[in-house]
Amino acid sequence: MVPWPRNAKIAFIGSHGIRKTTAALAFAGVMQRAGRSVEFAREVVRDNPLGINEGATAEAQLWVLTSQIRRELELSRQAECLVTDRGVMDNFAYYLRAGGGEDHFDVEPLVRRWSRTYDLVVRLTPDVAIRADGVRSTSDRFRDDIEAILDARLPRLVSRDRLVMQPASGITEDHDWWPLAEQLAMTVGEPLLAVGVTQPRRGSRLAPRRTRSPGSPGDDQLALDLGR
């Protein structure tokens, strides 16, 4: 395999309960199927020791935002492609809401600059009901608040040529992620397929699986059933 000359990064963002993790894992599987090395950065909010959901403070969301950056720094050079479940953009939206709309710690310049490090940003839009998972809020109002902040702030952070809009209802096991993978490869200026790899037939299914329980050391490492 001839590796890409530089590492690529793609973020799947949006409010909670809109299938971001499902989408990000499926996309990571496609990249591996193309013969590219992949790291997966899971969302960090579930590890937050300071509280989450509507009652989170600005300090709690600051922890999430800076932890997201730290995780991306740790993983970004370990593979040709880093796929992130969330990015600084949506974490910034939660931070602003927690602070009543105020940037109490003046992090916007950092968020603005870090937002440029993503080659592509996929924003999932919430046209599905929130499914209770025992952790994240099921409040539609809370989700609507986050989406409204994203509507207002995202155009300042991500240029149109790097932003992909995707309704959450389209995230199914039959969704074709290949065009998005090709778009990411174009940003690198290299072919998507590694030498000796052929494009999977359309409709072929990829089944991501973890080799460790969530939250265990190395949980960002993916083991994917590539059907080979």
Image (spheres, rainbow, N blue to C red):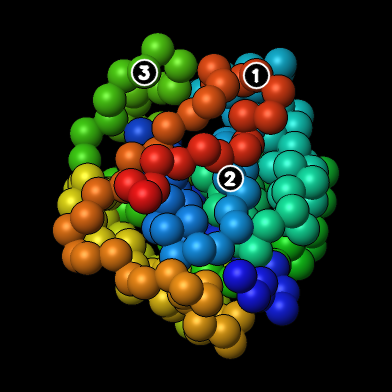
Q: Is residue 45 left or right of 27 when viewed as pictured?
A: right
Task: In this rendered view, identify the residue nearer to me: 112 or 124.
Answer: 124
Quadrant position of residue 218: top right
In this rendering, the answer to whether 129 lies above or below 115 is above
In this rendering, the answer to whether 97 lies above or below 5 is above
Q: In the rendering, which numbered label is found on residue 216?
A: 1
Q: Name the residue: 40% across, 12% down.
A: 134
Earlier in the chain: of badge 1 and badge 3, it is: 3
Quadrant position of residue 153: bottom right
Q: In the rendering, which numbered label is found on residue 46?
A: none
Q: Is residue 214 left or right of 4 when viewed as pictured?
A: left
Q: Provide the secondary structure element on which disc 1 rests.
A: loop
Mark-to-mark CA distance, 1 and 2: 14 Å
Q: Name the residue: 42% across, 76% down.
A: 182
- The answer to whether the residues at label 1 and label 3 have Cβ atoms under 8 Å apart is no
Q: In the rendering, which numbered label is found on residue 133?
A: 3
Q: Provide the secondary structure element on which disc 2 rests.
A: strand
Task: Read off the residue under disc 2.
Answer: 40
In the rendered structure, which amino acid carries the disc numbered 1?
Ser
Mark-to-mark CA distance, 1 and 3: 19 Å
* Residue 112 rendering spot, x and y as whole percentages: 71, 65
Q: Is residue 209 left or right of 217 when viewed as pictured?
A: left
Of tags 2 and 3, the one toward the viewer is: 2
In the rendered structure, which amino acid carries the disc numbered 3?
Asp
